[in-house]
Image (cartoon, helix red, strand yellow):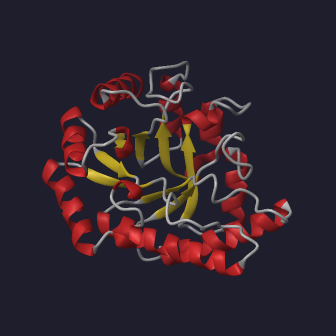
Amino acid sequence: MKYSVCNELFDGWGIEETIRAAAEIGFDAVEIAPYTLSKQVTDISKERRREVRRMAEDSGIGIAGLHWVLVGPDGLHINSADASVRARSQDYLLALVECCHDLGGKAIVFGSPNQRKVAEGLTRRQAWDYAKETLLGAARGAEGTEVRIGLEPLRAEMTDFVNTAEEACRFVDEANHPHLRVTLDCYAMSGESEPIPAIIRSTGDRVCHFHANDDTRREPGSGSVDFSLIGRALREIEYPGYVSIEVFEFERDPKAMAERGLRRLKEAFGP
């Protein structure tokens, strides 16, 4: 199993310091929230991308991919009734694909709860079709790269659009494009009625990325999620990607938090 950590866990740290710490702890990669490098991904120069990729390579780890991708700029929305807003959102997603590829990453986690809520005045079906059109355009732009866009089901308190893994699977099955897949997140799945291992098995090879966190919104091992069963399910579907620690509740010592989380995953999954 390959392990990654989301860089915003190291709140306020520079990317070089974060990469160095991740390598020292024992992670195989870092997952980057683009807003931690610049407000807009289009402002991250090619030179800066090469520099960050080289930092990781020099530390002996990789870049897993990108997440929290639509934090900026303002005004983006994948199912807006306004075609120009959808077009700008698709263009920005294409820029994210390019950045992810430049960094050597393979996954773009599409969570972005506010930028996917059912837009005012639309039916759920209209929102679904508009979102599919927008994400499909971005997926087509990833052709010829190893980048996959992973639609991430989120809890209903975060968004009203794609709240379960079953919905995400149905969405990507309808879209039917190899570069549009599913990201699974343990905290989100812990709110579903079906057990997490069963969700993993039913999602199967649609999974392109996996977020490990506990039902506390903190690192693995801080709550009641059984990661031993999760590890078994991931092996059963022959999941090839990273298991990446993402947290929503932070503390003063992020390195200790990351160390605890990785230790729990290795205990549960094996080396």
**Horizontal side, residue 52 vs residue 129: left or right:** left
Residue at x 20%, y 44% (from the top left corner): 17
When the figure is inspected, residue 114 is found, relative to residue 187, above or below; the finding is: below
Residue at x 63%, y 52% (from the top left corner): 113
Residue at x 46%, y 35% (from the top left corner): 247
The front one of 200 and 213 is: 213
Quarter of the view holding residue 89? bottom right
Q: Can you see residue 65?
A: no
Residue 246 location (% of width, % of height):
44, 39
Name the image quarter holding the C terminus: top left
Residue occupying the far front of the picture: 74
Residue 58 location (% of width, % of height):
13, 53
When the figure is inspected, residue 116 is found, relative to residue 236, above or below; the finding is: below
When the figure is inspected, residue 9 is found, relative to residue 111, above or below; the finding is: above
Residue 137 location (% of width, % of height):
59, 76
Q: Can you see residue 133?
A: yes
Residue 192 location (% of width, % of height):
70, 33
- Number of numbered tags placed on the structure image: 0
Residue at x 52%, y 19% (from the top left corner): 223
Quarter of the view holding residue 132? bottom right
Name the image quarter holding the N terminus: top left
When the figure is inspected, residue 223 is found, relative to residue 167, above or below; the finding is: above
